[in-house]
Image: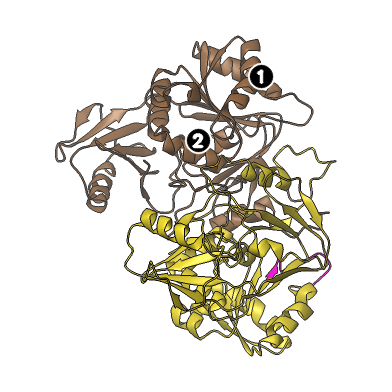
Chain colours: A yellow, B brown
Amino acid sequence: MKQLFHILVQNFTKLHPLQHVITRNVNRCKCKTPVYITSKKKIISIKHLVIKKRRKSPCIYEEFPKIRFIPMSKPHLLLLSSSKVHGYEFLEYAASDIKNFLNKSGVSTVLFVPYAAVDHDAYLKKVTPVFNKWGYQVEGIHNNNPIEAVKKAEAIFVGGGNTFLLLKTLYDKQVVNLIRERVLKGGIPYIGSSAGTNVAAPTIHNTNDMPIVYPQSFSALNLIPFNINPHYLDPDSTSKHKGETREERILQYHELPPEYPVHHVLGLREGCTLHVDGDVAILKGIANARLFLRGKPPQEIPLESNLSHLLTKNICVEQELQILQ
Amino acid sequence: MKQLFHILVQNFTKLHPLQHVITRNVNRCKCKTPVYITSKKKIISIKHLVIKKRRKSPCIYEEFPKIRFIPMSKPHLLLLSSSKVHGYEFLEYAASDIKNFLNKSGVSTVLFVPYAAVDHDAYLKKVTPVFNKWGYQVEGIHNNNPIEAVKKAEAIFVGGGNTFLLLKTLYDKQVVNLIRERVLKGGIPYIGSSAGTNVAAPTIHNTNDMPIVYPQSFSALNLIPFNINPHYLDPDSTSKHKGETREERILQYHELPPEYPVHHVLGLREGCTLHVDGDVAILKGIANARLFLRGKPPQEIPLESNLSHLLTKNICVEQELQILQ
């Protein structure tokens, strides 16, 4: 069985020697899986490191006693391309998916994160009756101490809007790392829509939004090891507009030189949803997706496709060491 | 006559007292114009500060002997929405505008900045024959020491591509401040297209591009005091796509709370060009523009409109102090 790990590293301060130590040791392990390295004060993520030999956990590695492998809970994610789909009311097209997803974990109250919008109260007012109708209570993260709210959350719903504003506010409120821990270690269900789906990826490099504010990093929650382009739109062959198409922009990203580590990109058309249950990822909803694996032609992904390989594949061209928060 | 100034400030290290000192003094001056403050090691920009009394220049202000007002040359800018327009070859729709613009300054060689693309050589190869045909030599900034190349440039053309990649590379090569100085103080002609037009604005907050790399700031060359949205696209009332329209995204930017200083935005449709000659700005080309003044309904701007008021108007809601480089 594949499993996600936290690697607890204590008393390392310099990043490069740390990367070297981890790389040298985890390369002896067996399974290929994303690995996250936790030190006392910060989460450092070495994305998509190849672990060739899985250690029992928690364990003390003989040569490096300060490294502990900590098993992570299976993540439960429901990532929606959008809240609005032509011909449907707000969130309506995903109603049964959302209800099934939350019921599986026995959720009664959802913590709503409206940070992608400017007016948090208005956004909460829009979302609450929809979830109430389905039998769930909704709390707004902005009405409480955000850190305490995330710590107590049964489930999290991060709504759409502007991805830059969302990520900046998550950093400003110091909940990036905490949401990640609660979802990956605590196993609480995470629903994202549009911008909320963007930030579930390792980075927001493939958002469509305008960069109206400057977040402290483009690194995001890193709940899955590939990027997402929500509201994916096919090129229109009849258009006279010469601005880049969505496909051209994503291919441009994949053409970056090697000093920029890039991720594969899943283009979710409106009405498309990605269900992640531990190490299983399935495409659902009412529209196909389009997958951009770096160096390969884009692929059409039909509904009900199993995309689990994207969760475990060694995706990065180079190992990348990043401070998330 | 309105005139741009550099204010040379020496031996100030703390930003807030500096802002206070400058504000208190320049408020006694007469003309309304953007003001830039230069210290020894960094350029600090107080955007759109109201100067009520213009000082002779260079002069030593009596009470604050370390502040000098230095006159700046009239900027010569030709800002294109795009290089490609439906029905035209690359840059063809703007051919006579570009030639007239360069001839006015007696330019024989243009420094081309291909940083918005990954393959600089290929981009140079595409641009060179077009300018050669019009009688100009072209040099690629990447084929020389970029700093020396900018210092010697007769004219600069910054091409389109990815705005984030362009701005990051400009910062990495340490030419943001230098290009700004050469254009605003040295008076050399600047041509921007798409991403190259985006970076001529105070910030890149209104680009349409994907944030495929992380620049050290969203502050850009600041050659004009308002932002630009190139490739501006009208909402399509027949579309079933629910992603935000360009108009919605710009209005979202203007709805940001007061802690985020925002700029007015000029939406340049493809084929639309903005000509800036000192304190005169005229809209030209083959398509109208759309102007978004914060707090007002969007306005349609016909060809040949005089937009000079945008160059001098006190645009920011709050004075903003930013380190550019």
Q: Quadrant of residue B91?
A: top right
Q: Nearer the viewer, residue B102 or A282?
A: A282
Q: Which mark is residue A227?
A: none
Q: Tag 1, which chain?
A: B
The residue carrying mark 1 is B95
Q: Amino acid at mark 2?
A: Ala
Q: Earlier in the sequence, mark 2 or mark 1?
A: 1
Range of magenta residues: A79-88
Name the residue tied to disc 2. Answer: B200
Q: State yes or no: discs 2 and 1 in contact (Cβ < 8 Å).
A: no
* x and y percentages locating residue B165 in the rendered image: 54, 40
Is B292 magenta? The answer is no
Left or right placement of residue B262 versus residue A262 in this view: left
Q: Position of residue A12 (x, y in %)?
A: 33, 64
- Taking depth in this image into account, of A260 and B145 the one nearest to the observer is A260
Does residue A236 appear left or right of residue A143 in this picture?
Answer: right
Image position of B180 with respect to B207: above or below: above
State which quarter of the image contains the C terminus of chain A: bottom left
Q: Position of residue B278 (x, y in %)?
A: 46, 26
One can see residue A243 in this view: yes
Query: Which quadrant is home to the N terminus of chain A?
Result: bottom right
Residue type pointed to by label 1: Ala
Out of B258 and A100, give the one closest to the viewer: A100
> Closer to the camera, A88 or A25?
A25
Q: In the structure shown, which secondary structural element does the residue marked by tag 2 occupy?
A: loop
Total numbered badges shown on the rendered structure: 2
Position in image of residue B191 (x %, y %): 54, 26
Is residue A82 inside the magenta stretch?
yes
